[in-house]
């Protein structure tokens, strides 16, 4: 008799009395994703006004003095910022979607990006050339901090507004849309108030861009991720029971509302940090978990897999934004919005087929 | 609750209410002409309108405040009626022409026309605005209603958000490449009645009137559709025709308002709810009530915007958003499950 085994399905791994269930696909996703990420980053570093081959890029990264300045000081920080921002967004999206058990929830719908945009536009317009040009140093430190604060406050605000004796995923999404409507109106009003040059600069920021990112942008994100990712992965054990629904989770002894609020807070912090360093790069947080889930063949977004997928998506989108339009470099957010919106529509149509609504 | 109210005869004073609404609109228009950064005494306003002699005050009233008031009446009526139509056709209390991608569709088409053809002047790019508004609204209705079960408040809102994000991405790409388009776009997107080209009024008026005529023709169809498509069909209504007339009216009204005054979000959301409280569910009353209330609310918001930040002013778009956002969120919170 032959047993038919589904390729990539779960297998049992036995060692004496202990046995584990191993699922090869989710495990494979991470190294495969990292390999793709490395390739995309090498390609991204190689492209530009001064093209460098992938082999040379790798040699320089390994210590060769050739092209050291261009690679290490100009292009590597940009690629790293993209990867880190994408990773933060991917993890944040996976958390939100798991907690709300809703594929449409993401930090974008929590208003993080719009809230950060309002604050940044206000700062740019207020300190811009129209107001005497106090920019410079203030803008360098002030904008990321302001974006962080704006994102955090908006995310928490929307979460609290959507709270009504418990959390409903769809209510959260709709409240987020309402909040985003108000925030974007305020943003446009501020843009119309300012000088056209300031408005243009602010516009680039609120579209989400990796342009001119240096090591000073890499360090804070890397530091934040180094602290937050392990904390989230440990705290995410609660997700296992949260995914079953409120009642079963409570029955399993979980303090449902507390652990859910903490995990949402972590997701908001991650998304705000990403937004602070690259602006609101839309749809990565929505798309990465969904793509990772399908690649891994799991029923829920895998956390580490989503993190890697987010990084791959962001670096890939940046590569497209930099190279696909001839001599013109577009902000990465344009590419993610244009490619990501159809995905949202697809998820929408698909979730209706499954009659979730 | 509503049915009880109808049975009690709570709406039997509708003709009197209609008269009150007409008076309120007239009062709002009067306030819009009278109040502003520069104090103009009532007698001077009267002279400026009926016996202009070319003084500075006459110029302020005739070239700034009258067009601004006219834009307010036009756009407010159009958006109020369009909001009632959208909510009636989708049977969706959260529907708003601004949230359903129509605004961003018009924005994209207009920016594209500035970018590729260097179009200037509202008379030319309003056509692009219309095309964009129509394409976006049809797209959102198709996407939001695809699959089994038709459109729900959630799918429409999300389809609107997705289309808006997509178009916003494209617009952002375009305006970053072209500073002139950026300059036009940001003022347009902010949504204001002031500083609009008065020459656009005669261009827009026919579109709004045509939209209002179509909306009037649509009222009895909407009443039947409120009972569900099957019932409406068995009552002898042609569903496809009623839907087509509705979409045409929504596009004409929203397209004209949006092309003239920019993104005025949330007006089309709030007004039908207020009007429904006065008129009941009958669309033959709801539509005129919405139009009058829309004009009143828009003018009132505009006048308030002039008063809160004297001597400067806050654009009416932002006043509406500050009013409408909380309204929208309260509507979402009021319903236990967003199923409808």
Image (cartoon, coloured by chain):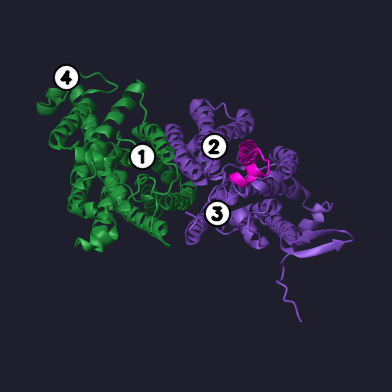
Label 3 SS:
helix
- What residue is rendered at 88% in x and 59% in y? A17
**Mark drawn on residue B295:** none
Q: Which residue, given by chain and number where applicable, does mark 1 sit on?
A: B266
Apparent side of residue B160 relative to residue A110 in the rendered image (left or right): left
**Figure colour of chain A:** purple
Q: Which residue, given by chain and number where applicable, does mark 3 sit on?
A: A335
Label 3 neighbourhood size at 10 Å, few (<14), some (14-19), many (20+)?
many
Apparent side of residue B24 relative to residue A132 in the rendered image (left or right): left
Measure how far apart labels 3 and 1 are at the Cα level: 28 Å
Foreground label between 2 and 4? 2
Kindly indicate whether the residues beneath marks 2 and 4 are on one polypeptide chain. no
Q: Is residue B163 above or below residue B77?
A: below
Foreground label between 2 and 3? 2
Foreground label between 3 and 1? 1
Residue closer to the observer: B102 or A294: A294
Q: Which chain is green?
A: B
Foreground label between 1 and 4? 1
**x and y percentages locating residue B200 in the rendered image:** 24, 43
Q: Which residue, given by chain and number where applicable, does mark 4 sit on?
A: B42
Q: Are marks 2 and 3 in contact (CB under 8 Å)?
A: no
Residue closer to the observer: B230 or B312: B230
Kindly indicate whether the residues beneath marks 2 and 3 are on one polypeptide chain. yes
């Amino acid at each position: 008799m032959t047993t038919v085994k589904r390729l990539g399905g779960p297998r049992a791994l036995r060692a004496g009395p202990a046995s584990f269930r191993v699922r090869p696909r989710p495990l494979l996703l991470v190294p495969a994703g990292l390999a793709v990420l490395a390739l995309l980053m090498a390609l991204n570093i190689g492209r530009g006004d001064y093209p460098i081959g992938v082999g040379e890029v790798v040699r320089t990264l390994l210590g060769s003095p050739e092209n050291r300045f261009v690679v290490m000081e100009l292009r590597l920080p940009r690629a790293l910022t993209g990867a880190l921002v994408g990773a933060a967004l991917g993890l944040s999206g996976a958390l939100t979607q798991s907690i709300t058990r809703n594929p449409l929830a993401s930090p974008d719908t929590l208003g993080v990006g719009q809230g950060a945009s309002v604050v940044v536009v206000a700062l740019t317009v207020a300190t811009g050339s129209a107001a005497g040009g106090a920019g410079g140093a203030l803008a360098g430190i002030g904008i990321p901090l302001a974006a962080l604060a704006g994102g955090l406050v908006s995310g928490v605000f929307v979460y609290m507004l959507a709270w009504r004796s418990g959390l409903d995923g769809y209510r959260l999404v709709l409240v987020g849309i309402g909040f985003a409507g108000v925030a974007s109106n305020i943003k446009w009003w501020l843009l119309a108030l300012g000088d056209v040059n300031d408005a243009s600069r602010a516009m680039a920021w609120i579209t989400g861009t990796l342009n001119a990112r240096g090591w000073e942008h890499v360090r804070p994100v890397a530091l934040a991720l180094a602290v937050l990712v392990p904390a989230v992965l440990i705290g995410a054990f609660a997700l296992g029971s949260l995914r079953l629904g409120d009642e079963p989770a409570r029955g399993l002894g979980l303090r449902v509302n507390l652990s859910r609020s903490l995990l949402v807070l972590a997701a908001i912090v991650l998304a705000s940090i990403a937004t602070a360093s690259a602006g609101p790069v839309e749809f990565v947080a929505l798309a990465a978990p969904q793509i990772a889930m399908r690649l891994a063949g799991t029923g829920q977004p895998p956390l580490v897999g989503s993190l890697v997928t987010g990084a791959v998506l962001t670096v890939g989108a940046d590569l497209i934004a930099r190279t696909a339009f001839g001599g013109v470099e577009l902000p990465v957010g344009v590419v993610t919005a244009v490619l990501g919106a159809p995905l949202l529509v697809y998820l929408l149509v698909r979730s209706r087929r499954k009659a979730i609504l | 609750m509503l049915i009880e109210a109808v049975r009690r005869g709570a709406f039997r004073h509708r003709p009197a209410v209609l008269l009150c609404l007409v008076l309120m609109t007239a009062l709002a228009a009067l306030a819009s002409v009278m109040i502003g950064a520069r104090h103009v005494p009532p007698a001077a306003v009267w002279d400026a309108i009926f016996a202009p002699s070319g003084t500075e005050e006459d110029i302020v009233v005739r070239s700034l405040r009258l067009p601004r008031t006219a834009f307010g009446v036009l756009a407010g009526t159009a958006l109020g009626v369009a909001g009632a139509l959208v909510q009636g056709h989708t049977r969706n209390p959260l529907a708003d022409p601004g949230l359903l991608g129509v605004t961003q569709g018009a924005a994209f088409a207009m920016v594209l026309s500035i970018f590729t053809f260097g179009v200037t002047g509202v008379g030319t790019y309003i056509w692009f605005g219309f095309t964009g508004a129509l394409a976006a609204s049809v797209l959102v209705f198709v996407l939001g209603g695809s699959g089994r079960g038709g459109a729900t408040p959630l799918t429409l809102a999300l389809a609107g958000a997705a289309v808006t994000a997509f178009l916003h991405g494209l617009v952002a790409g375009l305006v970053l490449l072209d500073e002139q388009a950026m300059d036009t776009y940001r003022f347009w997107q902010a949504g204001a009645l002031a500083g609009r080209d008065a020459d656009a009024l005669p261009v827009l008026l026919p579109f709004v009137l045509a939209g209002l005529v179509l909306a009037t023709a649509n009222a009895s169809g909407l009443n039947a559709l409120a009972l569900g498509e099957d019932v409406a069909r068995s009552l002898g209504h042609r569903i496809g025709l009623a839907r087509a007339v509705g979409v045409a009216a929504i596009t004409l009204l929203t397209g004209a308002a949006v092309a003239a005054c920019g993104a005025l979000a949330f007006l089309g959301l709030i007004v039908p709810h207020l009007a429904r409280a006065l008129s009941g569910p009958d669309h033959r009353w709801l539509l005129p009530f919405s139009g009058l209330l829309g004009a009143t609310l828009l003018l009132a918001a505009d006048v308030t915007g002039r008063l809160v930040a004297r001597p400067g002013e806050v654009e009416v778009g932002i006043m509406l958003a500050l009013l409408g956002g909380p309204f929208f969120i309260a509507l979402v919170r009021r319903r236990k499950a967003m199923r409808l």
